[in-house]
Structures are given as structure tokens and as C-alpha cells.
Amino acid sequence: MISSPTSVTRLLAEAAGDCTSRHCGTKLASRMVSRKEQLTDDAARRGAVMDPGPPRYENMRYRVVLQGRAIGGADIEHVKREFVRVTGLPAAVAEGYFNGMPQPIKRQVARADAERIAATLRAIGAAASVEREVDDPDDDEHGEIHIAANPLIIGPPTVIPGSDAGTLAAVVVPRPRWVRELRAKLPAIGGVAALVVAALYFAPEIDGFVQTLTPASAPPAVVAASTRRAPAASEPAATFAPDATLLYGPWRCTDQRTGVATYWTYRDDGAVVYHGDTLKEGAAATATDEPRAWRLAGEHLVLTSAQGSVTSFAVDVLTLTNLRYGDARSRIAIDCRRP
């Protein structure tokens, strides 16, 4: 160790005072060497000379932090399967790492090893970062994640997930299954479409070619006018002839317009009895305009009241169980059934 400037100056002054001969230079040099050895011995005894050791940066340790998510739009389930394949960890452990929270996956490693592990994780689509470890590992015994930074922002910055363009290019996002199947069937679909378009385009030419191969059919024979069959004479329409005997007996007649039902009895002597809304013996007490007599005139039912007024109705149906008559002008429609 070299002495301070003050000690050197004092040593030169002492040597100059004692230098009176031509051997002054040799004497001065020997005294300086002796003084230097004495100062070095004194510093060694006081512990002033110490080994500084290797530089601080050579002992820096790093950790790899898994961010708990995927990058580059990768499917999280696919990333989990790749993570299990690459690391050999169980699937349950992979579920715990990909829960959306940052977690350290490798600690106390050199920077080169940390970068290599993080690059492998990014290649399978997992977000990973490299962070510098804290100086005292005992301060991080509880497993919390700390962002370590040196004073005055000294040292390399923390690697941001996905900042490396090379790792992003290595992430391959698998296509959905239906896209892959459709892509495999595209040639067949294109061939069928081309055949359909060709058939529609050449249809007229094909039809003309087929007609040229088919022999012409003979023209239809002309039928002589004398041999034509004369149209059959129209047969007379069957006329409706109601049978008066089918009208004998009680009937329950319903007005189709109002829905009111009344009971009537047509006697064989031409009399008609009105019973009212219930079927009972004898005639009901009604006004004098109710019909008292009946007769059939062709397809018409003629009813005569006690005052002599006559009303004619067209009979549509007359069977043993059904009587239907009415008047289109008066808008009367009566349907009768056997009670």
C-alpha cells in the first residue's frame, strides 16, 4: 500500500537534511524503501488491506415468475396441456399455476438459466417473466412476490412477458376442429359445385343431342268426322219428391238463426200441433197466428194458421228422422229432428 502524500513529503525532507555527500541519492532511496515496508506492515496489522472478493453482479440470482395467463391469444387449456408435457408436473399443479395470479416457478438461478426457462414457457403460450431475487432470501420465506430493484435504477430491466418478438412468433394457436375438417373437404365441395355449374350450362346442348338420337314419332291419326261419337244427351236431373208419410209424428225443430227449439206434431189428418219448448200432451196456449194445418205441395211445405194466413216453405231434406225447410227471402231456416 502506498503511503499518503504527507508521509512521502516528510520522508523526502528528512532525507534531504541528512544528505551531505555524493552518495546522497543511494541513501535516500534505501530510506524510502524501508519506510514503505514499515507502513505496509502497519496497515496489514490494522486490517486495512482486505480482499474485495468477486464483483457483486457475478453473484446475482434470478427467478422465473409464471403470470398465470396465456399470451398471443393462445387457448388456456392447450397451454395447460403443453405445460404438463414440458414440465412433467401433474395437471392439478398446472391448474394452480394458471389461476390468473403471478407465481414463482423457479428461484435462485443464474440469469442465463432463467432466460432459457422463461423462453421455453413463452414458446408454449404461457406468460412468464424473469425477475431479480432479493438480497436476503430469508425475507421472502412466506412466498410473496416482490419486485426487486437496485438503488439508482442500476442493472438490467425486468423482462416483460411477450416483449420478445421471437417468442411470440413461436406460439402457434391451433385452429378449431370444424375449420380443419372444412379445409380437408374443400376440394370435394369445389368439385361438386363445378359439376353442377357445368350441368346447368350445357343442359340445352345435351337435350338437343338426345333429341337427335331419338326417332321422330308418327303424327296422331286424324279421326273422320263421320266416325265421331255424338255427345250423349243430357239426362234430366232427378227431382226431389218428398213423401208426406215421413212427416207424421212429433218433431223437435230448431231455428238456425236464434237457436230456439220448439216441439211440433204433424198428424196424418193434416193438422199440426204446437207444444211449445217441451213435448207434452195437447197444444200449448199460444197466439192465434201459430200454424194449425199442413200439407205438401211438391217440394214446398204449406202451413195454414187459424186466421187463414198461408205460409210456404221450401223443403230441402225430408227423411224419417230429419226435416229441413226454410225461406230464403224471409231468412228462415228450420232444422227438425225426432225427439
Image: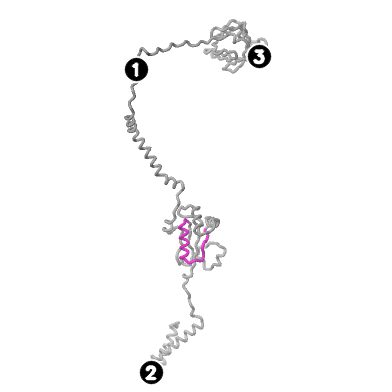
Mark 3 to mark 2: distance in Å?
Answer: 179 Å
**Residue pointed to by mark 1:** 222
Closer-to-camera residue (14/237): 237
Closer-to-camera residue (47/77): 77
**Residue pointed to by mark 3:** 279
Label 1: how many Cα within 10 Å (few below 14, some 14–19, many 20+): few
Q: Amino acid at mark 3?
A: Leu
Q: Amino acid at mark 2?
A: Ser
Q: Measured along the vertical axis of the image, is residue 253 above or below residue 60?
A: above
Looking at the rendering, the stretch of residues picked out in magenta corresponds to: 102-125
For the C terminus, which image quadrant? Answer: top right
Q: Measured along the vertical axis of the image, is residue 147 above or below residue 12?
A: above
Mark number displayed over residue 21:
2
* Quadrant in the rendering for residue 12: bottom left
Element on which disc 1 rests: loop
x, y (%) of residue 237?
48, 11
For the N terminus, which image quadrant? Answer: bottom left
Q: Measured along the vertical axis of the image, is residue 321 above or below residue 22?
A: above
Closer-to-camera residue (234/244): 234
Element on which disc 3 rests: loop
Mark 3 to mark 1: distance in Å?
Answer: 72 Å
Q: Residue at x 34, y 35 (%)?
A: 202
Give the mark nearer the N terminus: 3 vs 1: 1
Q: Residue at x 41, y 12 (%)?
A: 231
Q: Measured along the vertical axis of the image, is residue 181 above or below residue 323?
A: below
Label 2: how many Cα within 10 Å (few below 14, some 14–19, many 20+): few
x, y (%) of residue 249?
63, 11
Mark number displayed over residue 186:
none
Element on which disc 2 rests: loop
Residue 15 horizontal side relative to residue 278, left or right: left
x, y (%) of residue 25?
38, 90
Do the numbered discs 3 and 1 sit on residues whose CB atoms are within 8 Å?
no
